[in-house]
């Protein structure tokens, strides 16, 4: 198997990213929304020590995807 191109899809942009993947593949498809939940913004779940821990473990991902707390 040869992978010519790759695309990273982010959950926070899943609808738009999925549409781009379908376009790349030349297909028409819909991504169903199943088991969705309502919740507070993610920043409200983190306190100072937890932010530091997550930053230490996921530093590369945070930088690569421009995440911030």
Image: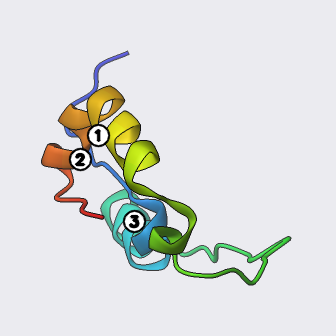
* Residue 27 seen in the figure: no
> SS of the residue at dot 2?
helix
Look at the image and tell me whether residue 22 can be seen: yes
Are there few (<14), some (14-19), or many (20+) residues within 10 Å of tag 2?
some
Q: Which residue is mark 3?
A: 26
Q: Quadrant of the C terminus?
A: bottom left
The residue at 35%/70% (across/down) is 23
Cα–Cα gap, marks 1 and 2? 7 Å
Circle 2 is placed at which residue position? 62
**Which of label 3 and label 1 is nearer to you?**
1
Where residue 35 appears, x then y in whole percent? 85, 71
Q: Is residue 63 left or right of residue 52?
A: left
Residue at the (15%, 45%) spot, across then down: 64
Distance from Cα at disc 3 to Cα at disc 1: 38 Å
Name, please, the residue furthest toward the top. Answer: 1
Mark 1 highlights which residue?
55
Mark-to-mark CA distance, 3 and 2 = 32 Å
Mark 3 or 1, nearer chain start: 3
The answer to which quarter of the image holds residue 61 is: top left
- Name the residue at 32% across, 41% down: 52
Secondary element at image label 3: loop
Q: Residues within 10 Å of mark 3 (few under 14, many from 20)?
A: few
- Mark in front: 1 vs 2: 1
């Amino acid at each position: 198997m040869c992978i010519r191109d790759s695309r990273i899809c982010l959950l926070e942009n899943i609808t738009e990213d999925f549409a781009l993947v379908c376009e790349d593949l030349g297909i028409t498809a819909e991504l169903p929304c199943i088991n969705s939940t309502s919740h507070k913004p993610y920043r409200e779940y983190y306190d100072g020590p937890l932010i530091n821990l997550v930053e230490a473990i996921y530093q590369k991902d945070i930088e690569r995807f421009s995440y911030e707390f």
